[in-house]
Image (tube, rainbow, N blue to C red):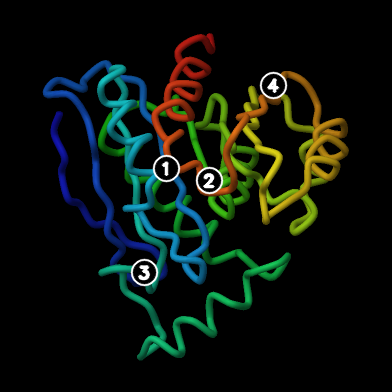
Protein backbone atom coordinates (compact mmCIF):
# COMPACT_ATOMS: atom_id res chain seq x y z
CA UNK A 1 0.00 0.00 0.00
CA UNK A 2 1.28 3.46 -0.93
CA UNK A 3 0.51 6.81 0.70
CA UNK A 4 1.32 10.06 -1.07
CA UNK A 5 1.14 13.44 0.67
CA UNK A 6 -0.36 16.06 -1.66
CA UNK A 7 -1.60 19.66 -1.76
CA UNK A 8 -4.37 21.37 -3.68
CA UNK A 9 -5.77 24.88 -3.76
CA UNK A 10 -9.14 26.47 -3.02
CA UNK A 11 -9.93 30.16 -2.50
CA UNK A 12 -6.18 30.95 -2.63
CA UNK A 13 -5.57 28.57 0.27
CA UNK A 14 -3.28 25.53 0.22
CA UNK A 15 -4.97 22.42 1.62
CA UNK A 16 -3.33 19.10 2.44
CA UNK A 17 -4.40 15.57 1.65
CA UNK A 18 -3.18 11.99 1.32
CA UNK A 19 -3.66 9.62 -1.62
CA UNK A 20 -3.75 5.95 -0.60
CA UNK A 21 -3.49 3.20 -3.19
CA UNK A 22 -1.86 0.03 -4.37
CA UNK A 23 1.26 0.39 -6.50
CA UNK A 24 -0.67 0.49 -9.78
CA UNK A 25 -3.85 2.58 -9.57
CA UNK A 26 -4.26 3.36 -13.26
CA UNK A 27 -7.58 1.49 -13.42
CA UNK A 28 -8.57 1.66 -9.75
CA UNK A 29 -11.98 3.07 -8.83
CA UNK A 30 -11.54 6.23 -6.76
CA UNK A 31 -13.10 7.40 -3.49
CA UNK A 32 -13.12 10.86 -1.93
CA UNK A 33 -13.20 10.63 1.88
CA UNK A 34 -14.77 13.46 3.91
CA UNK A 35 -13.83 13.78 7.58
CA UNK A 36 -16.01 14.77 10.57
CA UNK A 37 -16.38 18.32 11.88
CA UNK A 38 -13.10 20.04 12.88
CA UNK A 39 -14.61 21.43 16.11
CA UNK A 40 -15.28 17.85 17.20
CA UNK A 41 -11.78 16.64 16.45
CA UNK A 42 -12.45 15.70 12.85
CA UNK A 43 -9.49 15.47 10.51
CA UNK A 44 -8.11 13.17 7.84
CA UNK A 45 -6.52 10.94 10.52
CA UNK A 46 -9.87 10.13 12.14
CA UNK A 47 -10.25 6.42 12.94
CA UNK A 48 -13.03 5.80 10.40
CA UNK A 49 -11.44 7.87 7.63
CA UNK A 50 -8.06 6.17 8.15
CA UNK A 51 -9.69 2.74 8.11
CA UNK A 52 -11.58 3.55 4.92
CA UNK A 53 -8.34 4.63 3.24
CA UNK A 54 -6.48 1.47 4.25
CA UNK A 55 -9.25 -1.05 3.64
CA UNK A 56 -10.27 0.49 0.32
CA UNK A 57 -6.64 0.34 -0.88
CA UNK A 58 -6.56 -3.36 0.01
CA UNK A 59 -9.79 -3.78 -1.96
CA UNK A 60 -8.31 -2.13 -5.06
CA UNK A 61 -9.50 1.47 -4.67
CA UNK A 62 -7.58 4.72 -4.79
CA UNK A 63 -8.68 7.19 -2.11
CA UNK A 64 -8.06 10.82 -1.23
CA UNK A 65 -8.58 12.06 2.30
CA UNK A 66 -7.94 15.69 3.16
CA UNK A 67 -8.05 18.33 5.86
CA UNK A 68 -10.52 21.19 5.62
CA UNK A 69 -9.15 24.74 5.74
CA UNK A 70 -7.61 25.55 9.11
CA UNK A 71 -7.19 21.89 10.08
CA UNK A 72 -3.74 20.31 10.42
CA UNK A 73 -1.46 21.95 7.87
CA UNK A 74 -4.27 23.20 5.65
CA UNK A 75 -4.16 26.97 5.38
CA UNK A 76 -6.86 29.30 6.70
CA UNK A 77 -7.67 33.01 6.74
CA UNK A 78 -7.96 32.80 10.55
CA UNK A 79 -4.75 33.66 12.41
CA UNK A 80 -4.89 31.55 15.57
CA UNK A 81 -6.55 28.50 17.10
CA UNK A 82 -9.29 30.50 18.83
CA UNK A 83 -10.31 32.20 15.58
CA UNK A 84 -10.28 28.88 13.73
CA UNK A 85 -12.48 27.33 16.40
CA UNK A 86 -14.96 30.21 16.24
CA UNK A 87 -14.98 30.01 12.46
CA UNK A 88 -15.83 26.31 12.45
CA UNK A 89 -18.40 26.62 15.24
CA UNK A 90 -20.57 28.58 12.81
CA UNK A 91 -21.07 25.48 10.67
CA UNK A 92 -22.27 23.24 13.51
CA UNK A 93 -25.93 22.30 14.04
CA UNK A 94 -27.24 23.49 10.72
CA UNK A 95 -24.96 26.47 10.25
CA UNK A 96 -23.36 27.58 7.00
CA UNK A 97 -21.01 24.86 5.71
CA UNK A 98 -20.41 26.36 2.26
CA UNK A 99 -16.63 26.60 2.69
CA UNK A 100 -16.34 22.93 3.65
CA UNK A 101 -18.26 22.01 0.51
CA UNK A 102 -15.87 24.17 -1.51
CA UNK A 103 -12.91 22.40 0.10
CA UNK A 104 -14.37 18.99 -0.75
CA UNK A 105 -15.19 20.06 -4.29
CA UNK A 106 -11.60 21.23 -4.76
CA UNK A 107 -10.38 17.88 -3.42
CA UNK A 108 -12.67 16.10 -5.86
CA UNK A 109 -11.33 18.20 -8.74
CA UNK A 110 -7.78 17.33 -7.71
CA UNK A 111 -8.64 13.63 -7.58
CA UNK A 112 -10.15 13.78 -11.05
CA UNK A 113 -7.00 15.47 -12.34
CA UNK A 114 -4.88 12.64 -10.92
CA UNK A 115 -6.82 9.69 -12.27
CA UNK A 116 -7.79 11.20 -15.62
CA UNK A 117 -11.44 10.17 -15.40
CA UNK A 118 -14.53 11.45 -13.69
CA UNK A 119 -16.34 8.45 -12.22
CA UNK A 120 -15.77 8.73 -8.48
CA UNK A 121 -17.39 7.57 -5.25
CA UNK A 122 -17.68 9.65 -2.08
CA UNK A 123 -17.76 8.45 1.53
CA UNK A 124 -18.35 10.81 4.45
CA UNK A 125 -18.55 10.39 8.20
CA UNK A 126 -20.77 12.50 10.50
CA UNK A 127 -20.38 16.15 9.35
CA UNK A 128 -18.34 14.72 6.47
CA UNK A 129 -21.43 12.76 5.48
CA UNK A 130 -23.26 16.06 4.97
CA UNK A 131 -20.36 17.40 2.93
CA UNK A 132 -20.10 14.22 0.87
CA UNK A 133 -23.84 14.16 0.22
CA UNK A 134 -23.85 17.79 -0.89
CA UNK A 135 -20.86 17.39 -3.23
CA UNK A 136 -22.12 14.05 -4.52
CA UNK A 137 -25.58 15.45 -5.23
CA UNK A 138 -24.33 18.55 -7.04
CA UNK A 139 -21.49 17.02 -9.04
CA UNK A 140 -21.91 14.99 -12.20
CA UNK A 141 -18.56 13.26 -11.65
CA UNK A 142 -19.79 11.13 -8.74
CA UNK A 143 -21.47 7.75 -9.19
CA UNK A 144 -22.69 7.03 -5.67
CA UNK A 145 -22.00 7.98 -2.09
CA UNK A 146 -21.92 6.40 1.36
CA UNK A 147 -22.77 8.21 4.58
CA UNK A 148 -21.82 7.10 8.10
CA UNK A 149 -23.75 8.51 11.06
CA UNK A 150 -25.45 11.16 8.97
CA UNK A 151 -26.57 13.91 11.41
CA UNK A 152 -30.15 13.92 10.21
CA UNK A 153 -32.10 16.72 11.83
CA UNK A 154 -29.11 19.07 12.06
CA UNK A 155 -29.01 20.04 8.40
CA UNK A 156 -31.59 20.41 5.66
CA UNK A 157 -31.27 17.44 3.30
CA UNK A 158 -34.62 17.79 1.55
CA UNK A 159 -32.86 17.78 -1.82
CA UNK A 160 -32.21 14.05 -1.36
CA UNK A 161 -35.79 13.35 -2.39
CA UNK A 162 -34.65 14.28 -5.91
CA UNK A 163 -31.27 12.53 -5.91
CA UNK A 164 -31.18 9.48 -8.20
CA UNK A 165 -27.61 8.43 -7.42
CA UNK A 166 -26.86 5.35 -5.33
CA UNK A 167 -26.88 6.02 -1.60
CA UNK A 168 -25.75 3.92 1.37
CA UNK A 169 -26.50 5.11 4.92
CA UNK A 170 -24.95 3.37 7.94
CA UNK A 171 -26.27 4.19 11.39
CA UNK A 172 -26.30 2.96 14.99
CA UNK A 173 -28.77 3.16 17.85
CA UNK A 174 -26.53 5.08 20.29
CA UNK A 175 -25.55 8.12 18.24
CA UNK A 176 -25.31 11.60 19.78
CA UNK A 177 -25.54 13.18 16.31
CA UNK A 178 -29.02 11.85 15.57
CA UNK A 179 -31.68 9.47 16.83
CA UNK A 180 -32.91 6.25 15.32
CA UNK A 181 -36.34 7.84 14.89
CA UNK A 182 -34.90 10.84 13.05
CA UNK A 183 -32.76 8.59 10.85
CA UNK A 184 -35.70 6.39 9.87
CA UNK A 185 -37.97 9.38 9.29
CA UNK A 186 -35.41 11.21 7.16
CA UNK A 187 -34.44 8.09 5.23
CA UNK A 188 -38.08 7.51 4.27
CA UNK A 189 -37.99 10.82 2.37
CA UNK A 190 -34.83 9.96 0.39
CA UNK A 191 -35.41 8.85 -3.17
CA UNK A 192 -34.26 5.47 -4.49
CA UNK A 193 -31.84 3.88 -5.05
CA UNK A 194 -30.96 3.80 -1.37
CA UNK A 195 -29.84 1.41 1.35
CA UNK A 196 -30.04 1.87 5.12
CA UNK A 197 -28.05 -0.50 7.36
CA UNK A 198 -27.87 -0.69 11.15
CA UNK A 199 -24.45 -1.31 12.72
CA UNK A 200 -25.34 -2.95 16.03
CA UNK A 201 -23.42 -2.78 19.29
CA UNK A 202 -21.63 0.50 18.76
CA UNK A 203 -22.05 4.28 18.94
CA UNK A 204 -21.10 7.37 16.94
CA UNK A 205 -17.38 6.59 17.07
CA UNK A 206 -17.52 2.95 15.84
CA UNK A 207 -14.43 2.00 17.84
CA UNK A 208 -13.63 -1.62 17.11
CA UNK A 209 -15.99 -1.56 14.12
CA UNK A 210 -13.81 0.45 11.75
CA UNK A 211 -12.99 -2.43 9.42
CA UNK A 212 -16.57 -3.70 9.46
CA UNK A 213 -17.85 -0.28 8.38
CA UNK A 214 -15.11 0.10 5.77
CA UNK A 215 -15.81 -3.33 4.25
CA UNK A 216 -19.52 -2.53 4.05
CA UNK A 217 -18.79 0.63 2.10
CA UNK A 218 -16.28 -1.08 -0.22
CA UNK A 219 -18.81 -3.84 -0.92
CA UNK A 220 -21.42 -1.24 -1.80
CA UNK A 221 -19.10 0.61 -4.18
CA UNK A 222 -17.76 -2.56 -5.77
CA UNK A 223 -21.29 -3.76 -6.50
CA UNK A 224 -22.39 -0.46 -7.96
CA UNK A 225 -22.58 -0.53 -11.79
Q: Are marks 2 and 4 in contact (CB under 8 Å)?
A: no
Q: Earlier in the sequence, mark 2 or mark 3?
A: 3
Q: Provide residue 3's location: percent of width, then percent of height.
A: 16, 40
Q: Earlier in the sequence, mark 2 or mark 4?
A: 2
Give me the C-alpha separation between circle 4 and circle 1: 20 Å
Closest to the observer, 98 or 199: 199
In this picture, residue 32 sits left or right of residue 132: left
Q: Provide residue 139's location: percent of width, then percent of height.
A: 57, 39
Give me the C-alpha separation between circle 1 and circle 3: 17 Å
Closest to the observer, 21 or 117: 21
The residue shown at (58%, 46%) is: 129
The residue shown at (49%, 25%) is: 217
Q: Disc 2 marks which residue?
A: 125
Camera-near label (1 vs 3) is 1
Q: Disc 4 marks which residue?
A: 195
The residue shown at (59%, 45%) is: 203
Q: Secondary structure at mark 4?
A: strand
Q: Which mark is residue 48?
A: 1
Q: Earlier in the sequence, mark 4 or mark 1?
A: 1
Give me the C-alpha separation between circle 2 and circle 4: 16 Å
The residue positioned farthest toward the front in the image shown: 201
Amino acid sequence: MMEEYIHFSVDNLRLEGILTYQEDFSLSPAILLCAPHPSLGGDMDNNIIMSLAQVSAQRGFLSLRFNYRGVGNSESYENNSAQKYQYWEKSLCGGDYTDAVRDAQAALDFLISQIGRDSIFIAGYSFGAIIGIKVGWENNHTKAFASISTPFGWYNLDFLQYCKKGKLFLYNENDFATTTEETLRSFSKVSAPKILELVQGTDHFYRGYEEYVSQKICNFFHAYP
